[in-house]
Amino acid sequence: MRLVSLLPSATEIVYALGLGDDLVGVTFECDEPADARSTKTVVVGGRDTSGMTPAEIDDYVRTQMSAGGDLYTLHADALAGLDPDLILTQDLCRVCALPSGHVDRALSHLGCSSDVLSLDPHSLDEVLETFSAVADAVGVPERGVDLVNGLRERLAAVRDAVAGRPRPRVAVVEWVDPPFTAGHWVPDLIVAAGGEPVAAMAGQRSVRVSWAELAAPRPEIVLVTPCGYHLEGAIRQAGAVVPHFPAASVWAIDGDGLVVRPGPRLVDGVEAIAAILHPEAVPPAPAGSVHHVA
């Protein structure tokens, strides 16, 4: 099958299933594996925000959405030229990727008959289920079973390693200016890693909060995992978080790689977070994945 991914996480799923050779189109944000953008056709573009501050990005997003504008551009001609059999997209978050409705309208306009699979998980279990959904849609269900079973075995190993240990209170900051707390599957990652998520919105959208609301539950550990940033960006932004949690240990994490994208590397994220919460019980996190800020 000829596959097109309109999500960085979907691109990671496709490769984890051993289907990289079938992938013909990706987005400008697909950076895992590293050569995805250079070896595939980019069919979704967007504004380069690398020179903007978190506050400027938030203002841009709010302005665009309040005006009914789009944050992403679908290169319809490029998509039509690829003649895909299956397009992987989402309806979970307009800020994160192009909604599936845009894709359906474009296909109708172009007269394309591609199938569209929308991946919209809200919990860690649902994320794992999307791997099987992709495998089933492509006709290789056994690969989905193998991938999910392997990931669940790793999650079980972490669970067993931290069983019976005290669970530290953990707050997750998904955006720093303005502050947003963790939502969707992120609180599940904390639980799986042996922590107690506080000021969190499990299974729901991440929401804007005040620093006082984040600090009120007295978290012992604060994880800074800004959406759209890897570790270096998280470290830069963590400096603005530290003053609000003088009694907590503040860590920066590769948010895009390990926390906010609903792909196979979320299990890497659980293992890395467990290394922060229970360093005596599990192996240390890989270099370049986490950093102790204060």
Image (cartoon, rainbow, N blue to C red):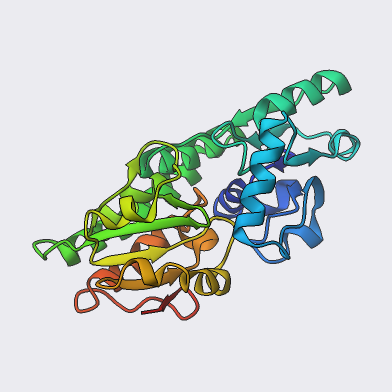
Residue situated in front as seen by the camera: 223 or 56: 56
Q: Position of residue 55 (x, y in %)?
A: 61, 56
Q: Using the image, determine if residue 3 lies above or below residue 196.
A: above
Which image quarter is the N terminus in? Answer: top right
Q: Is residue 165 visible?
A: yes
**Which quarter shows the C terminus?**
bottom left
Which picture quadrant has residue 126?
A: top left
In this rendering, the count of numbered labels is: 0
Give the residue at the far left of this rendering: 164
* Front residue (pair 183, 114): 183
Which image quadrant for residue 248?
Answer: bottom left
Residue that appears at 49% across and 48% down: 262
Q: Front-most of 151 and 277?
A: 277
- Residue 90 position, x and y percent, is 60, 34
Q: Is residue 112 left or right of residue 208?
A: right
Question: Which residue is pictured at 74% across the width and 41% down the height?
Answer: 72
- Residue visible at 44% across and 42% down in the picture: 207
